[in-house]
Amino acid sequence: FRNAIIHSIPAMPTRSKLGQYPVLYLELQYKSEYDGYLKDLRNKLSITTKNEMDESCIRDFSDINLDLSDLQTLLNDKNAIISTVHLWERDDFNSNIDIKDENNKSKVQRIPSYVLTPAS
C-alpha cells in the first residue's frame, strides 16, 4: 500500500504533475490506546527558496529548503501516543526525522529508498 502511494504521482502523470516526483512520505502509526490523530501535518512544513529566489522561479526541488523542525518538535511532543513512524525519502533528501522509544530505540521504520527515484 505504501509503495502504491509513493508510485502514484509519477505513474499517473497529468499536466499538473508532469515532472513531479515524491520527496517524502511520512505515516504515523498510533498506539492502540490512542483514539485520535494529529491533524494535517503539512502545516508543520516550511519551505523557503534558496538564494532569495522569487517563488515564481522555482523549477526543481533543489531550488528550495524544506524545514521540518516544527514537524520534529510535534513528533517529540506527541511521542507518547506514537508507536511507529513509517518514512520514505527520495535518495537525494534526508529529513533527519527521528523519535525514540523508552529504551532509546528509534521508532522510525524506513521504507527502502529504491522504491522510486527520478530518472537522470
Image: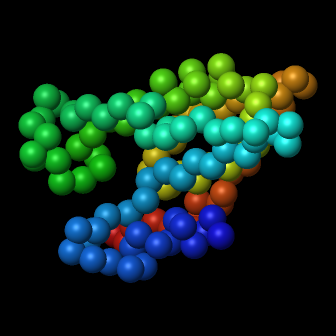
Instruction: Return the residue found at the far bottom.
Output: 12
Instruction: Return the residue found at the far front.
Output: 35
Residue at image coords 38%, 80% = 12
- Can residue 65 be seen in the rendering of this structure? yes
Q: Nearer the viewer, residue 114 or 33?
A: 33
Q: Name above or below for residue 99 compared with residue 90.
A: above
Q: Nearer the viewer, residue 7 or 52?
A: 7
Q: Quadrant of the C terminus?
A: bottom left
Q: Name above or below for residue 13 compared with residue 34.
A: below
Apparent side of residue 76 relative to residue 46 in the rendered image (left or right): right
What x and y, as percent, mark residue 19? 27, 68
**Quarter of image, res 111:** bottom right
Q: Name above or below for residue 93 compared with residue 71.
A: below
Apparent side of residue 24 relative to residue 74 in the rendered image (left or right): left
What x and y, as percent, mark residue 5? 54, 67
Apparent side of residue 56 relative to residue 100 in the rendered image (left or right): left
